[in-house]
Every structure is written in structure tokens, then in C-alpha cells.
Amino acid sequence: MAKAAEQPRERFTNFTPYEVKKGEEYMSADMLQHFKNLLLQWKQELMEEVDRTMHHMQEDAANYADPSDRATQEEEFSLELRTRDRERKLIKKIDQTIDRIDKDDYGFCDQCGVEI
């Protein structure tokens, strides 16, 4: 049980934080590229998880005679699909953020333009 609680933390520690150089401008080209690379890496990991789920569901799909087994499989698939749907939405947000980085509109408040 403790391992499941640690997973989200472990998931977000596999990157190196950006270190601001002395006198570096806010959201410099290097900083933006760093964030873009992080987002692209995260998106790739999510896409690989989607592929694994598709293969898992295709390989494990079976028509069980026992109603309990069938219900268990359907519930498992339902949970996986809900998770993948959340990840699909996250991928969309990642794409939107990458688009903002490409347009030099990242790191500033949408309302007032102040650095965030």
C-alpha cells in the first residue's frame, strides 16, 4: 500500500530542475527549451502508457463463462479506460502548453501579463 502512495512522487522526480544562471532573463530561450523538453518527455511517457494499455486490453480480452470473472475483467478495463481518458486530457494540456512555449507566451499570467 505504501508503494502506491509513493508512485506519484517518484513519477515527478525523474527530471533535473532548471537552474537559473546569474543575470538570466525570465523565460529565456534556454529555460523555455528546458520546459519544452520536460513536457515532450512527459507526453512520450503518457503515449507509451496508452500503447501498453491497448496491447494489454487486446491480449487479455476474453469471453469468460463465469459472470464474476467477466465482471472483474470489465471493471478492470473500465478503470484502465478512465485512467487513459484522464491522460488523454493531460496530453491535450501538454500540447497546449508546448504551443504557448512556441509562441513565447509561457510563464506569464493570462490576465495581467505578470511573471508567474
Image (spheres, rainbow, N blue to C red):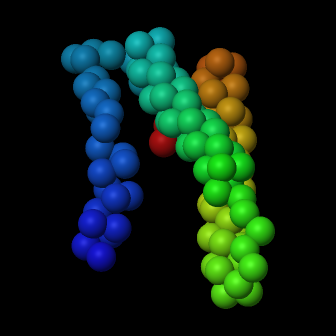
Query: 45 or 18: which is nearer to us?
Result: 45
Please state the horizontal and vertical placement of residue 6, each as a whole percent of the image. Answer: 29, 63
Please state the horizontal and vertical placement of residue 8, each as a whole percent of the image. Answer: 38, 58
Q: Is residue 61 above or below residue 23?
A: below
Left or right of 55, for residue 14: left
Instruction: Please say whether residue 69 is visible from this viewpoint.
Output: yes
Please state the horizontal and vertical placement of residue 49, each as a whole percent of the image. Answer: 56, 43
Left or right of 67, for residue 49: left
Check the image and name the residue furthest to the front: 65
Query: 63 or 83: which is nearer to us?
Result: 63
Instruction: Please say whether residue 107 is visible from this viewpoint.
Output: no
Left or right of 81, for residue 31: left
Check the image and name the residue furthest to the top: 29
Residue at 28% in and 23% down: 20
Residue at 72% in and 74% down: 64
Please state the horizontal and vertical placement of residue 59, each as a whole percent of the image. Answer: 65, 50
Residue at 65% in and 18% down: 102
Q: Quadrant of the N terminus?
A: bottom left
Query: 40 or 115: which is nearer to us?
Result: 40
Q: Is residue 91 above or below residue 78?
A: above
